[in-house]
Image (cartoon, helix red, strand yellow):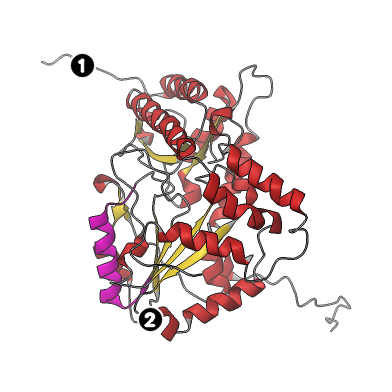
Amino acid sequence: MDSCDGEVAWRFGAAKPELAAADGEIRMRALVSRIYGCVDASDPRPVVPLASGDPTPFACFRTAPAAEEAVTAAVASGKHNGYPSATGVTEACSAVATYLSRYLPYELSTGYPLYEARAALSGLKFLHYDLLPEKGWEVDIQGVKALANENTVAMVIVNPNNPSGAVYSSHHLAKIAETARELGIMVISDEVYEHFVFGNKPFVPMGVFGEIAPVVTLGGISKRWMVPGWKLGWIAMTDPKGILRKKKIFASIIVYRGISVDPAAIVQGAIPQIIANTDETFFTNAMNVMRETAEICYQKLKGIKGVTCPHKPEGSMFVMVKLDMSCFCGIDDDIEFCCKLAKEESVVISPGSGLEMKNWLRISIAVDPPLLEDGLERVKSFCLRHVKPIIMNQAS
């Protein structure tokens, strides 16, 4: 259809306000790219990448030999070069179900998704509830109850938590399940960092509380096996009372699997051997390194003016750090802090504004320990240069 001035009035490409609010992941990636662009190319020091949770560049975080051998065997077999079933390779699904059942009181048969974008595309409204840093980043249960109404259908938790590094106790998870039951909603539990813990709290799957409220669990091999580029995850339902089946949620997930992008068939084909053959020492060694980097980060941050770490990370690959902007001269917010830090010290950190946490920083600890120490020493030097001078008056 032509407009009055003779130009075609194209009907596609119209702005969608509901998606504009769901661009958190895009915003964070754009911010990190902008900060990398501030790095001084003439700086002879190595760039310290503390922005993203990708441990693969570091030898101390290489994946298990059994995982690499399993993928090699899957390629060599010639059995996984065609299109996989939309419902997943049967042997892979079975292996994942058996793996998850080891940690649950039920037997299962069978992402980090962009929750806000998925919700917007489905015509769902999303609301943000608070985590409480003073309580180890626990869920603000009363805040959840205040936000929920008769249209609320689910709450999303991330445990172990990205970006705070918190690991939720069994007691707290039980309270979350009881809250979901009280509100009549399901719990969607992102457990992509399951068993990726190195503090004093053990990992407890949310599915343990499936008798209290139905649970949909999202997981994958990307974090625990240190292979984010292999792009394989899963959805599991813990629904011993059959509530999700009665409400047709199970059927909807089956339909969704048929229209979503499939993981590579070769990686699916390797999953049974990856799970069966990975030696526990691989996980133990990896968590020992993470425990070391968490301690390095926490202790180093204590000595940096204008920076506060409210809670030592106990899981995942990140820690959240609060900036006291009143301490700094010529730096207005977390984004400017990160840009100047990258330019002056070649250290790249994610600004909290990308997560709607202005004047916070998200620091990755999935870094080779000596490089992490070096990077945090550079952060300390940067802060010392930019901190406001202290005026001390003698008492009268």
Tell me which secondary structure the magenta stretch mostly adopts: helix
Amino acid type at circle 1 is: Asn
Amino acid type at circle 2 is: Ile
At a point 49% along the width and 75% down the height, the residue shown is 124
The mark found on residue 393 in the picture is: 1
Q: Per the image, is 366 magenta?
A: no
At a point 23% along the width and 56% down the height, the residue shown is 171
Could you say where residue 187 lies in the image, as x and y percent from the top left? 38, 68
Left or right placement of residue 171 versus residue 50 in this view: left
Could you say where residue 385 lies in the image, as x and y percent from the top left? 45, 19
Magenta residues span 167-186
For the N terminus, give its image quadrant. Answer: bottom right
Q: Quadrant of residue 333?
A: top left
Left or right placement of residue 55 versus residue 217 in this view: right
For the C terminus, give its image quadrant. Answer: top left
Upstream in sequence: badge 2 or badge 1? 2
At a point 47% along the width and 73% down the height, the residue shown is 125
Badge 1 density bin: few <14, some 14–19, many ≥20, Cα 10 Å:
few
Q: Per the image, is 173 magenta?
A: yes
Disc 2 is placed on an element classified as helix
The residue to which callout 2 is attached is 243
Q: Quadrant of residue 158?
A: bottom left
Foreground pick, 30 / 73: 73
